[in-house]
Amino acid sequence: MNNTKVCLANRPIGLPSPSAWSYQTSPLGPLKEGEILIKQHYISIDPAMRGWIREGKSYIPPVEIGEVMRAGTVGEVVKVNKNDHFKVGDFVSGAGGVQQYTCTNGQGFYKINTKHAPLTTYLGALGMPGMTAYFGILEVGKIKTGDVVLVSGAAGAVGSLVGQIAKLKGCKVVGIAGGAEKCKYLIDDLGFDAAIDYKNNNVFSELKVHCHDGIDVYFDNVGGDILDIALLKLRRHARIVICGAISQYNATAEIKGPSNYLSLLVNRATMQGMVVFDYADRYHEGMAQIGSWLADGSIKTREDVYEGIDKFNDTLLRLFSGEKIGKLLLKVS
């Protein structure tokens, strides 16, 4: 049985090209005692991947040249060698990487129940994006009933959940997304109060209409110009959650920071970074609550699935072109 894996060949400048990766296929060796073999079904494609292949200090060590590309995965245990925690047929989730099979001692992997939710949901609403949204808006954003909440990247895996959670908590929610289709999705499907198409409209002018009295919480997934504009519309004691800055991830020049930061001083506002791993010991809380919301229909999700490990780079680029809605996944084949 052979395993094909995608390894980092070099650190790209700008958008990753196919040359950033090396595809390696080799036979699977025998399992050591205590190991399990997982056949991967789906690979999570996340904006954080771009940061993981950048050299330098971050919240997690970078993927090294020659290593399998880091990724969240779901799959099925197909072999076990004396491991009491897993058995053949178990479905599991963990950081299996961009490869067809993962051999592991099981550390960092946990069993998932496909009777409660489809496999793919454990990489979306019940996975890292769901936990990011849940703890980001509730713990860092500290939303309360009546707040005006602005979300950028609102049609993505995290942003779409942030907006829905805020609505459930009694907030007015305005989403920023690229294109009429995404904005329609936010309002018609997810129940956002308003949506701003940053590709075809002036964001500042639209904020004056939809957030005329200002913003209490801004959940930022994009950084750059939109963050700078949002700073101008803060209410007193507003909270900005810095979750991501996808507009800056492939920058070849100096990263653009906010010039309107004095609004934080004037409005006694806060701007705080959010890394989901800080809440790892509380994931069970988030999963239980989001699972309940999914079950009763309070929250809706959407997935964009592409097939074939050879399509990894093409699928990754959809994060930055905006050619997807909801959670982006790669089906292993």
Image (cartoon, rainbow, N blue to C red):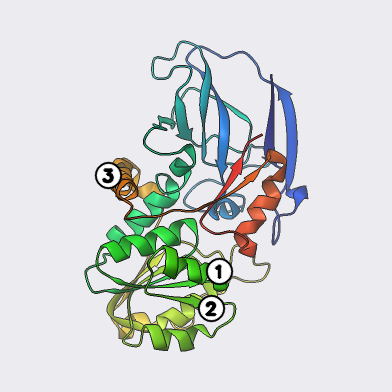
**Which quadrant of the structure image shows residue 108?**
top left
Dot placed on the residue nearer the N-terminal end, 2 or 1: 1
Distance between the Cα atoms at labels 1 and 3? 33 Å
Q: Is residue 194 left or right of residue 251?
A: left
The amino acid type, in three-letter code, at marker 3 is Glu
Q: Position of residue 78 (x, y in %)?
A: 54, 19
At horizontal 41% and vertical 80% (from top left) the residue drawn is 231
Q: Could you say which is closer to the camera, residue 186 or residue 18?
A: 186
Residue 225 circle label: 2
Q: Do the residues bearing badges 1 and 3 touch, measured as CB atoms within 8 Å?
A: no
Dot placed on the residue nearer the N-terminal end, 2 or 3: 2
Distance between the Cα atoms at labels 2 and 1? 22 Å
Residue 181 circle label: 1
Residue 285 circle label: 3
Q: Is residue 172 left or right of residue 90?
A: left
At horizontal 33% and vertical 84% (from top left) the residue drawn is 214
